Amino acid sequence: MMKHKYNISGMSCQGCKSHVTKALENIPGVEQVEVDLERGSAEVAMQKHIEIEEFQQALKNAGGNYQISMPSENTSAAEEKLMTHKYHISGMSCNGCRSHVEKTLNEIGGVAKAEVNLEKAEATISMHQHIEIAEFQQALKNNGGGYEIHPAGHQYHHTEKSKNKKKSKTKGNGKWYCPMHCEGDKIYDAPGDCPVCGMDLVQEQSLSASSITYTCPMHPEIEEDKPGDCPICGMDLVSKNPEPDAQNSTYLKLRKKLWLSLVFTLPVFLIAMSDMLNNNPLYKIMDLEYWNWGQFVLSIPVVFYTAWMFFERAWKSVVNWNLNMFTLIGIGAGVAWVFSVLGLLFPGVFPDQFKTEAGTVHVYFEAATVILTLVLLGQMLEARAHDRTNSAIKELLKLAPNKATRIKDGKEEVVKIDEIEEGDILKVKPGEKIPVDGIIKEGKSSIDESMITGEPVPVEKSTDDKVTSGTINGNSSFTMVAQQVGDETLLSQIIQMVNDASRSQAPIQRLADKISGYFVPIVVLISVITFVVWAIFGPSPSYVYAFVNAIAVLIIACPCALGLATPMSVMVGVGKGAQNGVLIKNAQALELMNQIDTLIIDKTGTITEGKPSVEKIVSVGGYSESDIAGFVAALNTHSEHPLATATIKYAKMREIEIEQASNFDSVTGKGVVGELQQKKLALGNKALLDEKGINSSGKIDREIEQFQQQGKTVSYLSVAGKVEGFVVISDPVKKTSKEALTKLIEDGVEVIMLTGDNERTAKAVADEMGIAFKAGMLPQDKMREVEKLQQQGRKVAAAGDGINDAPALAKADIGIAMGTGTDVAIESAEITLVKGDLKAVLKARKLSDKVMANIKQNLFFALIYNSIGVPIAAGVLYPFFGILLSPMIAALAMSFSSVSVIANALRLRAARLS
């Protein structure tokens, strides 16, 4: 076997690393791949040499714009003389930031190489000669993002100096991100504009404890930080109205600006349109020239206050060379306004074609102000629509209670939710929301878990059963022990997962991003061509026609509709999944789910309930059943396996005294051994007996086979080298498994069960489900099976709940974890089914179908809108129908194009997944 090291470029996050690793591992002949994200390198172990072109082709086929190259072997004398310095970088929060900073530093003259480590917040810069730190800081400042560079070890207090912070007057309950994902999954600490594209940042919803103040309805001067009674009149204190979230504040701010803009724009519009009237009555009051000056004065508040942010965004987009909608608006409206001002101040420099019969230059203050006001209207509607796309998370946030009843020293006390600690005893009364995750200590009740699992039927819960934060208690009180609090509760994790997935990018978005990159330059070029063609071939006054149509082209084009097409659908789709008990970790999984043609599933906890119980204990020698149960429980006190837990529970229920075995040892895949009362004990399968040289009679074997053929797990017990009995453990099949798997097979998905259980038990369950199976599979065997299917060109999803399933989940194209399983399995998976029900796999596929259809509709609409709108604005219909598009109508169409894309995405909220 040989190993080679390569440079990999184009990676910016853990998702990229995983994508590259999978692409290289799938190449025949490759044994192992280790990718280093920070260093941008890959070490590939292979059976024989593979040409680098084959690696590049595999990366190209997998998508993602990754490049592979050989590391440089030549180190010149100049390179040996390079000086290297380390610096501290502040302001980075994700790999998008790291990539942005690294690229900026590498572009500085004199820098040979710059490497940035996100974890250490450190930059290592090699340079030919010393470069002042001020030059690095200026480069970072010019490229935006609020990053700062300091000497290594320098103690500092980082303060964000970007405009985002200055604008922040709202105390939100989360963080902010750009809906266009300009810097990947980067999040910002305060509301404002995206430093790259200029769009309003969208607030990420979170469950972080907010400061709630309680006051008395009768005595508002009384304020407390927790519920209680008013010290003056004794009335219950009530919480003050919370502040509006940042997204709603953006909407309110834009609405205020819109009304103010209308106050000034409407008079400008009426003055301009009055020119169409015969014997214009306004001219009897004063001449046209003075009315033009009036329009100029009225337009100033619109241009320099209510809509000034659009010009700031346009400038920012040019500086960052991230050309977008605001670039076109800034150019179009700006040119119209500046042209009009110059026409007022210097009318003599303009050709007669630009002048009216009264000798004044045609002014376009009404076009500029109306365009800007309509764009403002579009932004306001978009802000409201953005607010609605987060509605699924907001509904989840409403589930979180803000107080709980804690029992301390035998007394009940009402406390805030963030004061609860692990191990606290809490009382949950009828109709109350369960405050944190934990187990029932005393009592029983029916719990409404529909808001978490999507299932409407309440679930009966009793002592030792798990309960989840945000679910609603039925008609009985119970006490519970808090186990997961704060960010560790299932509800918090669901909300965080939905937030993360909403910010992730689907592979289909690369197409939209690629088109958007060429879009604005092409539109500007079309605008210039429009002006030239109309100036040469247009009717008189040709320059006026040329000017107006060129502006209309700039205004009607809407690259933002293209950019929003994918992320809006993903955001709503991920939220819809969460409401139905399907948690999606990233957008890529959402896109790939409907392409899956093979599903690998585990048996225990996936097809079955994962709650084994002892069905029967059989004695075949001189010991009683109670003795056998005692021996079994003694051995299993050292084991954490679910089967062991079942045997201990069985012994406790029958009040059998449980001793502790000595010299305990676990034999992987076979069973356990130990000593009790100076007798050697062995508990396990037939392979364990064979290893220990213990014989069992044919009669016992045949009896055990009958149980195994019924899908039950059976363990032999030997005492002092002789089989004395066996224990039969059953794990019932989930009621919904058969129906779910049947529908998946009808949909064309091949289902294969891979289990570590014995052949007979596996066959019994597989036959009942009507699926193929392989038994005796170790974790590495399951992973190899996934690899084998992928090499055949299959799109493989793997579903499981245990640590032994984690390698297969990580290797599969999509890993699906049962929410009732282990943290390792959930961490390895892209999709988590909260209830652990295979019917949710069907929901995930249907959701994927609907989201992808919605994205394609959005992309089609955006492309068709621009493909039709731009030529019409350029005047292609004029020679045939005499139709021209006013820049004001173009602005209205442009504003509503983005809103229409978001509105279409919002239709997913009504989608039915069951």
Image (cartoon, helix red, strand yellow):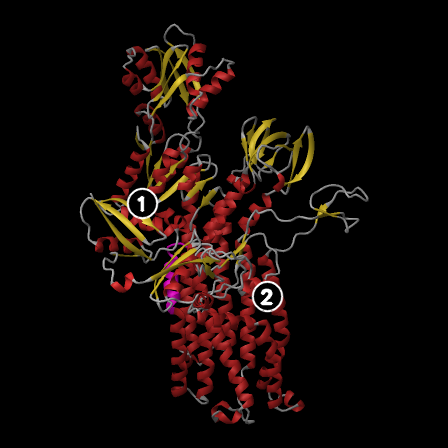
The residue pinned by badge 1 equals 795
Question: Which residue lies most toward the left here?
Answer: 48
x, y percent for residue 521: 39, 73
Q: Is residue 894 magenta?
A: no
In the rendered structure, find residue 254 and report the number of the disc placed on it.
2
In the rendered structure, find residue 176 and report the number of the disc placed on it.
none
Q: Magenta part of the protein: which range? A: 505-518
The answer to whether residue 883 is seen in the rendering is: no
Q: Is residue 506 magenta?
A: yes
Say which amino acid is labelled 1. Answer: Lys
Kindly indicate the quadrant of the structure image that contains residue 418: top right
Residue closer to the observer: 607 or 117: 117
User: Between marks 2 and 1, how big is the CA–CA gap?
Assistant: 46 Å
Residue closer to the observer: 775 or 642: 642
* Majority secondary structure of magenta residues: helix
Helix or strand or loop: what does disc 2 sit on? helix
Question: Which residue lies most toward the top here?
Answer: 622
Kindly indicate the quadrant of the structure image that contains residue 320: bottom left
Q: Is residue 246 left or right of residue 517?
A: right
Kindly indicate the quadrant of the structure image that contains residue 422: top right
x, y percent for residue 380: 57, 64
x, y percent for residue 604: 39, 29
x, y percent for residue 455: 51, 38
Helix or strand or loop: what does disc 1 sit on? loop
